[in-house]
Image (tube, rainbow, N blue to C red):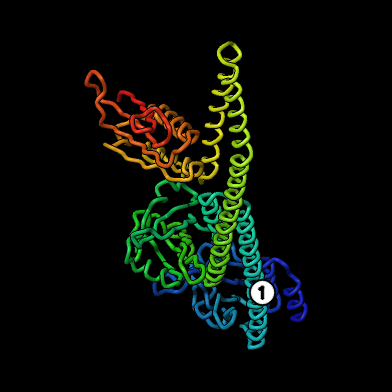
Amino acid sequence: MLLDAVLNVGSEVELASTLQHVVDSAADLTEARYGALALAGPAHGRGRSRIAELFSVGLSEDERRRITRLPTGHTGLLGHPGSTLSLGVPVRVNNDVLGYLCLARKRHGPFTEEDLALLRVLASQAGIAIGNARLYGTARQRERWIEGAAAVTTALLTGESAEDALTTLAKAARILAGAAAGVVLQPTDEGGMEIVAASALDDPGDIVGTSIAPGSPVLVQLLGGEPVYIDDSSTDPRMTTHVRSRFGPSMMLPLQSGGRLIGTLALPRKRGGRPYTPVDRMLATQFASQAALALVLADAQHNRERLAVFEDRDRIARDLHDLVVQRLFATEMMLESTRRRTGEGELADLLGHAVDELDSTIQEVRTTIFALQQPPADAPTGLRGKVLRETAGAAVLLGFQPSVHFTGAVDTLVRDELHTGLLAALRGALAAAHRRAGVTSIEVEVDATARLPGDRDGVRLVVSDDGDGDGSDGGSAVVWEAEL
């Protein structure tokens, strides 16, 4: 009968049904009226541990509710003394006592040594079943973390923006860890760390932007490449952020690349939440290492893609300059020469109009060429930067850098709606200077303190060069003005 009971225990798949079968078999083989297998929860004060799970036979619901502390068999299943009326043995996994298997009220006489030996065998089987379930649970947990790391790596390498990539990482880690929030922090210029991405069960709006001050004990540990494990974020003196009061157990895991800290992954659970186990910590640490590598690879891939775009833009700009602009300029010269030979008349006017249109087209193409040679994210917003960008672009075609002077706070005083007119006049003047012979230097002056007729405040643009022109010194000058 014992062999059958042991074999039946080993054939069960679900842990709960296995443990219930252990209790049923123990009661049947020993002819006990009552039986229970109680698994311990966290210790409560100095007393016996509270019960996390209870499997029983012969007990009413009222009697089950009365069993609040872990029975050992020495005090009786229901808390009454009597060694001959109760029997109990510990359930162990790797020498750790997880609970007790207890019997009470043998139908015929007291419990015997044979009953005790039988109970020990069944308790051993219960321990083996619990141990196997733990191993299976750990294996499944490890599999989920591995699958999660692979999914995050795939997401990061599919072209997400940096912000989206960090949020993807935070969300995946939060779900895998069963945390209340997943948080990614990055180093600040001041030497601290700031939360840059967050995923939370509640609104994470007030989490992003939270900073850890330089010199914080937590930060010192992270900068040393060590993870930080916290039992209760709300009471741990190492935690200094304003959001710590809502969280309990937490892990803060360094994201490292080449020995350099590129960020931190924090996984806090709700206040009063289940503590992280050693297995939880190990798997999360491995995930953080994989995620750090994925972030570095994603950043490198993004940089390669940007470089490829810049190279393509540069090639297009060179083609436009070497082929299109030169041909347009040659056509313009041919039309200008033909217009001069035709003299006055309607045909001359038509040719002159065609020359002007070609000149305008060349200016627009040159502007496009320069725009293609600039990184998209580097486009200036102030007037000073825009003027410098235009003159730098012209330098590519002129073969020298125009001299630029600013007077007054041009970025503050000149309204945005005036930028377009000023820059159009500047482009026209630079294009005209490029067409003239003998131009070796150009001066550009932008004066935001100019006085216009009628004693009005204004901005004045003056573009002058030393080429063949109508100026008194043999050069040419273009003046543009607008009221501020």
Q: Position of residue 323 (x, y in %)?
A: 64, 39
Q: Residue at x 37, y 34 (%)?
A: 464
Q: Which residue occupies 57% across, 59% down?
A: 300
Q: What amino acid type is highlighted by mark number 1?
A: Asn
Left of 306 or right of it: where is 187?
left
Q: Quadrant of the C terminus?
A: top left
Task: Identify residue for label 1.
Answer: 132
Q: Nearer the viewer, residue 457 or 337?
A: 337
Residue 374 lies, in percent from the top left, at 51, 45
Quadrant holding the N terminus: bottom right
* Residue 339 pos. (x, y %): 58, 20
Left or right, 346 with reference to 391: right
- Residue 59 location (% of width, % of height): 60, 65
* Image vertical order of residue 84 relative to residue 455, above or below: below
Q: Secondary structure at mark 1?
A: helix
Residue 304 occupies quadrant? bottom right
How would you rate the neighbour count of disc 1 (Cα within 10 Å): few for under 14, some for 14-19, many for 20 or more?
some
> Residue sitting at 41 percent across and 38 percent down?
386
Extreme residue toward the left, this view: 455
When asked about the image quadrant of residue 331, the answer is top right
Q: Residue 77, can we see it?
A: yes
